[in-house]
Image: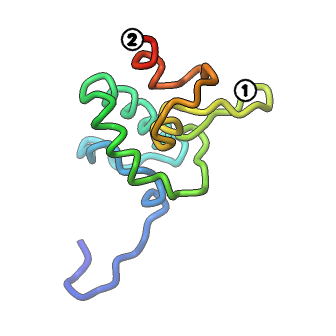
């Protein structure tokens, strides 16, 4: 814990979306493992807390222009495959039948 009045040092992990609780049983993740854990947490939170909640969380990150591999997209045979998180940040379905579209279930109802 920094002393009162001392500058707070930014950590590399502060660039990741804050969408999962801090786990005391885990000291630290490497960037790749943290990205995978966040992606898994996003899927779980969509299931447990629902789309409306996660759209609200994701909307805070809409202005972040840089994309993060394993969180916003994966690469498959040189092609970008956008994640549920990417689509949540977008805020609505683009009607292109994207593989990871979290809005798919809502649109089909």
Between the C-alphas of marks 1 and 2, the distance is 30 Å
Q: Which comes sooner in the sequence, label 1 or label 2?
A: 1
Which residue occupies 25% across, 41% down? 25
User: Which quadrant would residue 60 be assigned to in this image?
Assistant: bottom left
Instruction: Name the residue carrying label 2.
Output: 109
User: Which quadrant would residue 96 be assigned to in this image?
Assistant: top right
- Quadrant containing the C terminus is top left
Q: Indicate the position of residue 66 as horizontal and vertical percent values.
A: 61, 55
Point out the frontmost of discs 1 and 2: 2
Q: Which residue lies furthest to the right in this view?
A: 78
Q: Residue 56 carries which label?
A: none
Q: Indicate the position of residue 40 as horizontal and vertical percent values.
A: 42, 30
Q: Which of 99 and 94 is in front in this view?
A: 94
Q: Residue furthest left?
A: 4
Which residue occupies 36% across, 39% down? 55
Numbered circles on residues, count: 2
| Residue 109 left/right relative to 65 | left
Q: Which residue lies furthest to the bottom in this view?
A: 5
């Amino acid at each position: 814990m920094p002393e009162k009045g001392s500058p707070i040092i930014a950590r590399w992990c502060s660039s990741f979306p804050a969408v999962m609780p801090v786990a005391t049983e885990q000291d630290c993740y490497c960037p790749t493992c943290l990205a995978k854990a966040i992606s898994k947490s996003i899927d779980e939170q969509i299931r447990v807390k629902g789309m409306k909640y996660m759209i609200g969380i994701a909307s805070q990150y809409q202005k972040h222009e840089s994309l993060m591999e394993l969180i916003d997209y994966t690469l498959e045979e040189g092609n970008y495959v956008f994640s549920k998180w990417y689509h949540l940040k977008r805020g609505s379905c683009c009607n292109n039948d994207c593989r990871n579209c979290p809005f798919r279930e809502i649109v089909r109802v």
